[in-house]
Amino acid sequence: MGNDKKPAFDFSKIFTVEWLLTALHIILIVIIGLIVIKILSSVIIKIFKKKLTPQSSMIIRKTVLYSGLVFVVIYILNRLGIELTPLLGAAGIAGIAIGFASQTSISNLISGLFLISEKPFAVGDAINIGDITGIILSIDLLSVKIRTFDNRFVRIPNEKILNNELINITRFPIRRLDIDIAVAYKEDAKKVRELLLDIVKNNPFCLIEPEPIILFKNFGNSAMEFLLGIWFEKSNYLALKNSIMEEIKERFDREGIEFPFPHRALYTGSSTRPFPVEIITHQSSNPFQE
Amino acid sequence: MFWQTYSINENTLYCLKMGFLTIWIKQVEQDLYIAWKRYDDEQDISKLAICESGPDSQELSWSRWIFHSRSPSLFIKPCLPDRPLIIKPEIPIIIPRGNGGSFFINVPVWIQIGVNEETPLVLNEIPIYILSNSWFGDTISGELCYSKNSLIRKNYLDLEDKSWNAVCAIQMKNNSKSELSFDRFCLHTENLTLYAGEKRLWTSQVKIEFQGEGQLSHVTLSKIRPGFEKSVKTMNKPRKEIDDNIIKKSFQFLKTITGF
């Protein structure tokens, strides 16, 4: 008879009251655990707010999160009656296998620890590595995230950062802008120096001290070559670069100082005599026609 | 007096002149408009008054302040620069060990414009005299400052008497075992109180005790009003309140600068 037919799978044997209580307990532990982790990291960061850099806050937040999660998982396994000793043994063997398989990630992880301890940069610094220049968004264990100045997101593996030359552009509060300037040989080098000093003195983005550097660098092929080094507050880079270049061009034009073009001298065989030029007039319009 | 509270009418253009600076103010309904321009030549000083002729508005950039109600009054006050000031004497100064002296310098002030609501609200701070930007200390850990070539006088009456200058009385003492020779020193104007006397503006008196090269100087700021004029009242409190006695790097030595 159809009424006497037993179900293929008896769920009542699995979903017992005891099982449901255990499941509920685990769900509660997960929820409470996550809330406690969140509160704990916020409280720690709030207490040390003034002393912590954004980078340190991030590390503390992640350390608390991951430690908390490990603690919650261990508690749940224990609650389910799973023995941890064989699990840890298996985890060790699995760890070796995974380690071999994920050498790059481990290398990045170790590089990340070095970067965090060495502190070559902090969140918010502008750095240059290879062809990439941008602002540090975050320093994580595996990678560093950067926002470039044209608003692109770049993720650089920590290993690459550790193995390459890195320039921290904003580490120090002031910087020097070096400008190469070439002027024609006919100009008075002393006047050029005075003009440059005057331009620097009147530019609001230039610092008066440290004093600007004007170096007569070289007697070039076509010009006298100067180096102008101006100190500025790091946030004024664009404003200074634009304004000073315009001012130099405008002032040199006004003072009649010539920016030279490449010259080529032809040697006629004598150091003093000019190159002989003979002007031949032909009646024909074609110079090659007799 | 130039530094005071003013009441202004609606839809009327006002201007004030101080040194190289002219400021225009007007109130349209509840909103306040402020613009300023700096001239090459020094002008006669004039209080905030109705402007006979308006400025060429194309060459001015106005800032507009929006309020929910009409501001009852407007204050024009002097204030000290927002960054420390590097004072460069005409000639380097040398103080032998165990010696010291008092002198006076002029510190240029800014114009502070604000409205008196429940609490005074500052809208703009405008430098009257443009100071050069400079750096005090080494390139790694110094601080951003303004710089000014300054006359250092034993008597404040010998200083240039301009409405946009405040007189700062400085007492210096060399407590070290060597002579103190410097060609500039850093005055932390952000820690000073600004006072107005009957004739001049004054700052808190400063006492700098030099302890030795490589050691920080003890700087003491007097909280007593300067006693060089009879009636002196507080115009502006320090931007940064500090202890009475602070320790700061105050001198830049000839040795450091010349690289010997």
Image: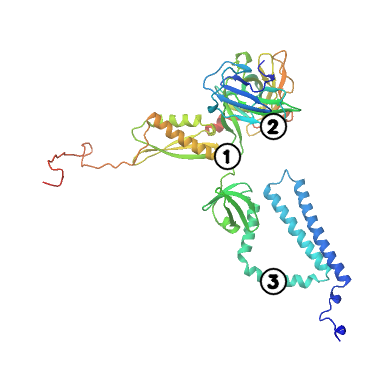
The chain containing the residue under callout 3 comes to: A
Total of numbered circles in the picture? 3
Q: Which circle marks residue B247 in the picture?
A: 2
Label 2 marks a residue whose chain is: B
Residue A75 falls in image quadrant: bottom right
Task: Tell which circle, 1 or 3, labels the residue nearer the N-terminal end.
Answer: 3
- Mark yes or no: residue A102 visible: yes
Q: Label 3: which residue?
A: A94
**Residue B38 % position (x, y):** 55, 24
Task: Tell me the crowding category of disc 3: few under 14, some 14 to 19, or many 20 or more residues within 10 angstroms, Cα based.
Answer: few
Identify the amino acid type marked 3.
Ala
Image spot of residue A134 (x, y percent): 57, 49
Of circles 1 and 3, which is in front? 1
Rendered view: A156 above or below B60? below
Q: Position of residue B246 (x, y in %)?
A: 71, 30
Extreme residue toward the bottom, this view:
A1
Q: Secondary structure at mark 3?
A: helix
Residue at image mark 1: A235
Image mark for residue B223: none
Quarter of the image that includes the N terminus of chain B? top right
Disc 2 to disc 3, C-alpha distance: 59 Å
Question: In the image shown, does A156 or B211 lie closer to the viewer?
Answer: A156
Above or below, comparing residue A49 to residue B228 in the picture:
below
- Which label sits in the foreground, 1 or 2? 1
